[in-house]
Image: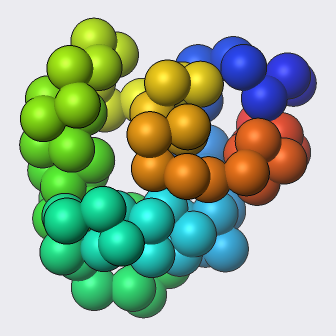
Amino acid sequence: RKASDVISLNRLNSDQVRTLQIALNQNGSPVSVDGKLGPTTKAALVKFQRREGIEKRGFIDQKTREALGIDQTVFVRAE
């Protein structure tokens, strides 16, 4: 899987979810950092994407990853 692909949240492992949660917190979308993909994390991601003008809401794509400052290698193994 290429890092530029759109990644479904349901395919993330707990370490990837934790990275996403940390990045959301660092970018003004407060969530608990527990490695669990619950409704609060999903809602925070959608809110962040909306605020940033990113179309693909509820998924991780290249624009979202870059806006959150997440290295491209973090989600490469999400299958």
Q: Is residue 35 above or below residue 64?
A: below
Q: Residue furthest top?
A: 55
Q: Position of residue 71 (x, y in %)?
A: 73, 51
Q: Residue at x 44, y 40 (%)?
A: 67
In the rendered image, residue 62, in percent from the top left (x then y), is placed at: 59, 25
Residue 19 location in percent, x, y? 57, 69
Viewed as shown, does residue 54 lie left or right of 15?
Answer: left
35, above or below 29, in the image: below
Q: Is residue 21 visible?
A: no
- Residue 24 is left or right of residue 65, and the answer is left
Residue shown at 27%/12% (left/top)? Answer: 55
x%, y% of residue 64?
A: 45, 33
Quadrant where the image shows the N terminus: top right
Q: In screen coordinates, is 47 left or right of 5?
A: left
State which quadrant residue 23 falls in. Answer: bottom left
User: How is the model colour-coded?
Assistant: rainbow
Q: Which sits in the foreground, 27 or 49?
A: 27
Q: Quadrant of the C terminus?
A: top right
Residue at image x 19%, y 64%? 29
Residue at the (18%, 75%) spot, across then down: 30
Q: Is residue 75 visible?
A: yes
Tally of marks: 0
36, above or below 59, in the image:
below
